Image (cartoon, helix red, strand yellow):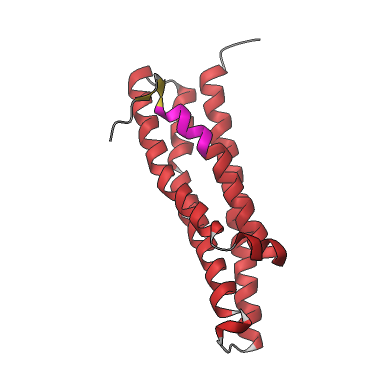
Amino acid sequence: MNLDTFAGLPLHILLVHVMVVGGPLTALAVLLHAFWPAARRRLGIVTPIAGLLVLVLTPITVEAGEYLQSVVGTTPALALHVERGEGLLPWSIALFVVGLAEWGWWRFLLAPQAGVRLTSSLRWGGTVVLWLAAAIVGIGFIVEIVLIGDSGARAVWGGLHL
């Protein structure tokens, strides 16, 4: 795969914009899916599909960033950005897994038409686990994206005084 440029722009720059918008929107979908039944019904399969897209784009974006780093060289600020960026994959995996688990839980296990009989304590316990997982992963992913973006912006624009 060619990870250098697209239409004359470094591919990393373009992918970053997709991740900065799509990642937090997916995290928000995971949170809404967990805590708001009306949103859950509307989001449906969209939440895990968006999570899968973020999961696929994360290593591609990192690899494109590594190519860009090889072209521009490394500074301490860029090294911090690279270190933070490489930490996004576990969050992306968790975002996809939690989104998929939520969808499966409410679509196949708790839906009345599913015909699955769970005890009330198992229904309650599973729901609480998903609430906690969604809160931790959704908020954690957003915080991680903000930190990565901030370090990237500082690496690019930190030396300028406008």
Left or right for 71, reference 44: left
User: Would you place residue 127 above or below residue 20 in this image?
Assistant: below
Q: Tell which of 60 and 154 is nearer to you.
A: 60
Residue 16 inside the magenta-drawn segment? yes
Indicate the quadrant where residue 32 lies: bottom right
User: Would you place residue 148 above or below residue 74 in this image?
Assistant: below
Q: In which quarter of the image is the C terminus?
A: top right
Q: Tell which of 28 and 160 is nearer to you.
A: 28
User: Would you place residue 70 above or below residue 142 in this image?
Assistant: above
Indicate the quadrant where residue 126 lies: bottom right
Residue range highlighted in magenta = 11-18
Q: Tell which of 104 and 65 is nearer to you.
A: 104
Left or right for 9, reference 40: left
Residue 89 inside the magenta-drawn segment? no
Q: Which residue is drawn at 65% across and 57% down?
A: 31
Residue 45 percent location from the top left of the image: 53, 62
Q: Residue at x 46, y 37 (%)?
A: 85
For the stretch drawn in magenta, what is the main secondary structure? helix
Left or right for 25, reference 18: right
Indicate the quadrant where residue 130 lies: bottom right
Residue 92 percent location from the top left of the image: 48, 50
Q: Tell which of 147 and 11 is nearer to you.
A: 11
Residue 149 percent location from the top left of the image: 56, 32
Left or right for 69, reference 45: left
Q: Quadrant of the N terminus?
A: top left
